[in-house]
Amino acid sequence: MANQLDMDHCFDFVMKLTIESAKIIRNAIQGGKCIETKAGEWDLVTQYDKSVEEILISGLIKEFPTHKFIGEETVSKTNILPNLTDEPTWIIDPIDGTTNFVHSFPHTCISIALAVNRQLEIGIVYNPVIEQMFTARRGCGAYLNGNPIKSSDISDLRQSLVCIEASYARIEEIRDEVMGRIEAFVSIAHGIRTLGSAALTLCYIAMGAADVYHTDNLSPWDVAAGVLIIREAGGTVIDTSGDKFNIMNPKVLAMGNKKLAPELIKLIRNADLKTQRKRINKNQSTINT
Ligand code: IPD
Ligand code: CA
Ligand code: CA
Ligand code: CA
């Protein structure tokens, strides 16, 4: 299927459409927004998330009428995540980093990927506020504003900058695990960052600005483009368990180079064991009192 598709055309078309649609984000980031919530008070969506997705999908449908789409705001209407098939499928996050966008924090982007035969072929992550355009095509390398990028070759966690999604600690059921993993990274790395856009964070790993990114709680549109960009930049993305990464159920352990993988998997496993032990001890002492 990929061979029958003109990938040059797909890439050029989606680039132009992305740049055009992103003007909405650039023009709106400083102003007032209509803000609604989805899963909770912290899960924000604006009229711009919806309009950018509509513009992207309608533009792509016109050009590629047989293609499929998985877009965050479309999926949100039914809460049903479609299966990824062999058909050419555009995986779209119209605004990744909506909370940043709402707060005029200039770390927000459009993220679009094209998968064919369930394989990522094109990835585009564009932050129009600070004009960072990350692109990749399978087998052709990764680029920032047209210049090739390469992920870091740090192989010692003690010399790493680690990005982790801290906000999930707000969810009571997973709070202890998230905090336990953060504590483990804080104790070993040079530093910890939470950037508020999964797609851009993956691109920062791709360009060597950070070395590791970890979170278990993302969706396909958060990661599809960034995963291809990291891989094309020389980095690795695996499942947190160490298994093969699943784009439709992303538990992300991304790194500048695969030498870090065994140490990372071990660190997370040990952090979880420590959390479980603490929980057992706490339950035990509650029973005993
Ligand atoms: C969010 C961002 C954030 C991550 C959340 C995502 P959105 O995407 O990528 O960094 O922690 O899980 O939902 O909602 O801004 O598109
Ligand atoms: Ca969202
Ligand atoms: Ca997102
Ligand atoms: Ca989004």
Image (cartoon, rainbow, N blue to C red):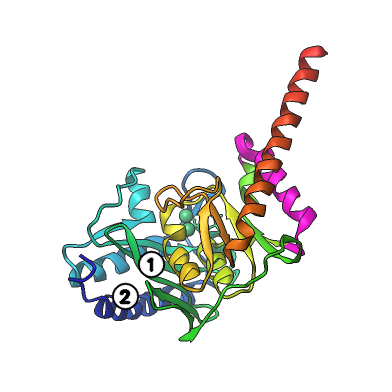
The quadrant of the picture occupied by the N terminus is: bottom left
Distance between the alpha carbons at the discs numbered 1 and 2: 8 Å
Residue situated in front as seen by the camera: 171 or 190: 190
Q: Is residue 283 left or right of residue 246?
A: right
Across and down, in percent, residue 138 comes to: 37, 71
Residue visible at 62% across and 62% down in the picture: 259
The secondary structure that dominates the magenta segment is: helix
Find the magenta span and give its range: 171-191
Q: Amino acid at mark 1?
A: Ile
**Is residue 184 shown in magenta?**
yes
Q: Secondary structure at mark 2?
A: helix
Residue visible at 75% across and 63% down in the picture: 191
Q: Amino acid at mark 2?
A: Val
On the image, numbered disc 1 is attached to which residue? 112
On screen, residue 247 above or below 107 = above
Ligand 4 lies under 8 Å from the Cβ of mark 1: no
**Is residue 78 shown in magenta?**
no
Q: CB under 8 Å between callouts 1 and 2?
A: yes
Residue visible at 69% across and 31% down in the picture: 276
Give the image quarter of residue 14: bottom left
For mark 1, does the 10 Å Cα neighbourhood hold few (<14), some (14 to 19), or many (20 or more) residues?
Answer: many
On the image, numbered disc 2 is attached to which residue? 14
Residue situated in front as seen by the camera: 240 or 68: 240
On screen, residue 52 above or below 145 = above
